[in-house]
Image (spheres, rainbow, N blue to C red):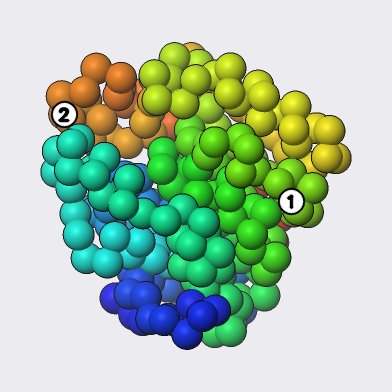
Amino acid sequence: MITFQRPDGASVEAYLVEPTDPKNAPGVVVIQEWWGLDDEIKNVANRLAKAGYRALVPDLYRGKLALEANEAEHLMNDLNFGDAASQDIRGAVQYLKATGSNKVAVTGFCMGGALTVLSAGLVPESDGAVVWYGYPPLEYVDASAITKPMLAHWALHDDFFAIAGVDQLEEKLKAAGVTYDFQRYDAKHAFANPKSDSRGLPPLQYNSAATNLAWERTMTFLKNTLGN
C-alpha cells in the first residue's frame, strides 16, 4: 500500500504492484467493483503487473469493504462519482506519470467501469480506457471531452447495466468522433469475476470463455495504446 496526493492535495491510499522491470514501464490505474479494494481487484492488478505494467488501485472506499450486496450498494451510493473520477482517479494517473510511467490507462469493473467512462472525460492525463460492464448515467458523459481511445466489454444479459444504455453510449461517442471499440459478450454481469457465482446474486455469472477473450483484447489494446 502506498499513499498519493489528489489534485486538491488530499491523500489517498492505494495498492501498487510493480512489474519485474518497472523502469519506464507504462501504468494502469485499476478501479474496484462496488465491493471495494478486495482480493479480486488486487488479483487484476497483479495480473497486469505480470504483463509488464505498473498497476495502481486507489482505495475509493477509504478502507471499507463489503461482503454483502446491501453493504456494497450502501458504500457505492455514498461515493461521490464526480469527485472519485476527477480527484482520486486523476491523482492516481498523475502519481504513475510522476513516478516513471510515460503513458497510463484506466480500467475498471462494474462501478469501476462507470467511473472509467467518467474519467475518460475528466482525466486529461489518461492515455486510454478499458471499461468492463459499467456506465454512469449518460447525461454525465461529456463525449466531446474524451480524446483518447476506449475499449469496452459489455454483457448482453446485464441486469444492472442494460445493453440499451450501451447502445446509447455508443451513439454519443460516435457522434463526438471518439476512437472506441465496444465488444459485446453473450454473458451476464460481472462475467470476468471468478467470485461471481458464489455471491448468491442471480444477475452475476462468471464466464471463462468471455473472460479469456476480453483479457486477450485488453492486452492487445494496452500494448497498442501504451506501448509495452
Three-letter code, disc 2: Ser
Where residue 72 sits: x, y (%)? Answer: 23, 43
Question: Could you tell me which secondary element the residue under label 1 belongs to?
Answer: loop
Tell me if residue 55 can be seen: no
Left or right placement of residue 184 versus residue 211 in this view: right
Q: Nearer the viewer, residue 226 or 108?
A: 108
Q: Is residue 163 above or below residue 86?
A: above
Residue beneath disc 1 = 146
Q: Give the camera-side residue of 154 and 159.
A: 159
Q: For the residues carrying marks 1 and 2, which lies nearer the camera in this image?
A: 1
Q: Determine which residue is flagged by label 2.
A: 198
Circles 1, 2 touching at the beta carbon (< 8 Å):
no
Q: Which mark is residue 200?
A: none
Using the rendered image of the protein, determine whether residue 156 is visible from the camera's viewpoint: yes
Rendered residue at 43%/20% (across/down): 158
Point out the tag, 1 or 2, that comes first from the N-terminus.
Answer: 1
Label 1 to label 2: alpha-carbon separation: 36 Å
Which quadrant, please, contains the C terminus?
Answer: bottom right
Above or below, comparing residue 157 to residue 105 in the picture: above
